[in-house]
Amino acid sequence: MRILTYRTAQPNPESSLQTCRIIFGYLQSYISMLEINPNNTQLSGSYKPQNVAKFNNLLSKADFSNITSSKCANTSYNLFLEIINLFYERSFPVRTITCRRNQRKREPWITQGILKFAKIKAKLYRRKLNTSTTENNSKYRLFCKIFLRIKRQAKFQYYRDCLKLNKNYI
């Protein structure tokens, strides 16, 4: 049995950059799904034009002779991946980005109205702390009860609607 191999002189830097972006994006989203991040930070690569030019320059100067001369496909692939990862890490530094409070992912049943109610609740809480009168305390407690009831109803209705929509698939 003979295995046919096709060799090219140089890999296309644009397609390898696109492949690296896809792999990096997939891994980044997979890691963010697995981890619960209390500080709500994200990792991001910097794809500025000068970084892309740096990546293309490194790829054009790279020596791929050990990859093309290797007899084993797995070894060639591993060497190629090491080179690409090394150049990618050099060219696109990873930085930590903190997300703003209003950009965080929230539960699907939380609507704009509930967010407005949360702001009102926070305002009443601050008022209760600053001037602790019986009127402020009672307003805050009453609003907390109403707010909790509205959140529970929204959550219940959301899941009820999801079940109604997908009842044929159960």
Image (cartoon, grey):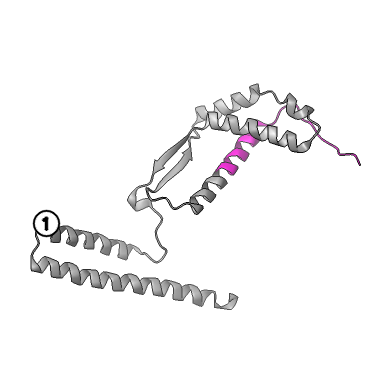
Region rendered in magenta:
1-24
Depth check, front residue: 75 or 169? 75
Which quadrant of the figure contains the N terminus? top right
Which residue is most to the top?
A: 61
Which residue is most to the right?
A: 1
Residue 41's x, y, as percent? 41, 45
Which quadrant of the figure contains the C terminus? bottom right
Relative height, residue 78 to residue 56 (above, below): below
Write down the residue under mark 1: 130
Relative height, residue 143 to residue 97 (above, below): below
Q: Kindly identify the residue that appears in the image at 33 percent across and 70 percent down.
A: 151
Q: Residues within 10 Å of mark 1 (few under 14, many from 20)?
A: few
Q: Kindly identify the residue that appears in the image at 69 percent across and 23 percent down.
A: 63
How many numbered tags mark residues here? 1
Q: Is residue 24 left or right of residue 115?
A: right
Residue 37's x, y, as percent? 42, 50
Q: Is residue 145 left or right of residue 12?
A: left
Disc 1 residue type (three-letter) = Asn
Q: Secondary structure at mark 1?
A: helix
The answer to which image quadrant residue 85 occupies is: top right
Q: Is residue 64 left or right of residue 118?
A: right
Is residue 15 shown in magenta? yes
Q: Kindly identify the residue that appears in the image at 74 percent across and 26 percent down.
A: 66
Is residue 54 shown in magenta? no
Residue 115's x, y, as percent? 30, 61
Q: Is residue 7 left or right of residue 156?
A: right
Residue 57's x, y, as percent? 60, 24
Q: Kindly identify the residue that appears in the image at 23 percent across and 69 percent down.
A: 144
